[in-house]
Amino acid sequence: MATPNNSYGLSDQQLKYAYWYILHKKQLQRIFVQILLVLSTVMFIYILYGLCWYWWRGATELDYWRLQNPNYIKWAAYYQNERIRDLIIDDVKVFPTGAKRVDVGVLIANPNENWGIKQIDYYFVLASGEKTPVQSSWFLPSEEKYLLALGIDSTSQSASLVLAKKEWQRLRKDRPFPEINLIVDQIQFKSARELGVSLLRGGQLEWQVTNKSVNNFWDVGFQVILLSGAQPIAYNYIQINELPSLSSKNLMVSWAENIPTVSSVKIIPQINLFDPKVLKE
């Protein structure tokens, strides 16, 4: 064991190390700085190589990897699909129904596959200034239908739509909507002349609806649109209390006002799947 020979209690070996460090301190500092420079240079070259590799080949290989990896998430496409897109709104149509009344309607499409509108409040402002009562409706994902206001006291020939409220709701993949599989057929429109009814100047429409799904439904509505060519010329609406699974019902609506020549008919079933009460147990 070394014997201390100074006031600080350092051995001869420790004193030699200290003396050597003092003599070579500047050299050690230069060596340390040089090592840092070498490491920095190596890191810079590595980063530069990586950037050059990506520029020349990396982007192509990354695209290949994306195609081969089914778990890769294309965030841009994901955002594009998940964001809420605005409703597609057609021109508002106003049809006189006699006795200074009009029917007002507008075709609207929901372009969102994963988003629906649980509640949409709306009204129309007629050219003469009258406002129709506020009504509520809904839009299922990817649904196209009409917003209507029927039998409005007015003689105006044009109107504008006001959407007072839109409550969007995202469709969860683990909770899909129940199946709606309603078949509308045996559609037959007859004018008043064909019916031989003098009190009915417009006409009458009959059709059959069949519920092909396994679900029983309450409160099933039907929007009925008469068309001349591609243009709507008359609106109507009817609702039935229930439509059991695998059942059929014959329905009818009529128009008392004069109607131009009808070339086709559009019937749009309406079931509010946002309301769990529409499913009959």
Image: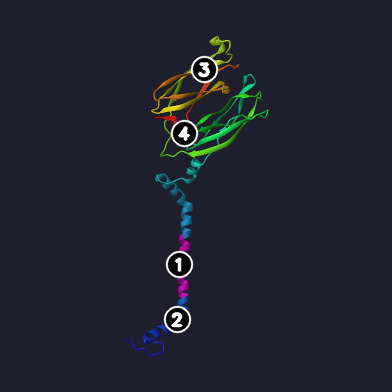
Kind of residue at badge 2: His
| Residue at (47, 75) in percent of width and height | 30
Q: Position of residue 143 (x, y in %)?
A: 50, 31
Q: Nearer the viewer, mark 2 or mark 3?
A: 3
Q: Looking at the rendered structure, which numbered label has been put on residue 275?
A: 4
Q: Position of residue 57 (x, y in %)?
A: 45, 51
- If you read the primary sequence from the N terminus, does the residue marked by circle 3 or circle 1 appear first? 1
Badge 4 local density, few (<14 within 10 Å), some, or many (20+)? few
Point out the tag, 2 or 3, that comes first from the N-terminus.
2
Q: Residue furthest toward the left?
A: 1
Give the label, 2 or 4, closer to the camera. 4
Is 46 above or below relative to 198? below
In what quadrant of the picture does the C terminus appear?
A: top left
Residue placed under numbered mark 3 in the picture: 205
**Type of amino acid at the residue the image marks with label 4:** Asp
The residue indicated by pointer 1 is 39
Check disc 2 and report the residue beneath it: 24
Q: Is residue 136 left or right of residue 176?
A: right
34 with respect to 164 (left or right): left
Assess whether mark 3 and mark 2 are in contact (beta carbons under 8 angstroms): no
Place of residue 199 in the rendered image (x, y in percent of width and height, measured from the top left): 58, 12
Point out the frontmost of discs 1 and 4: 4
Q: Pick out the residue farthest to the right.
A: 128
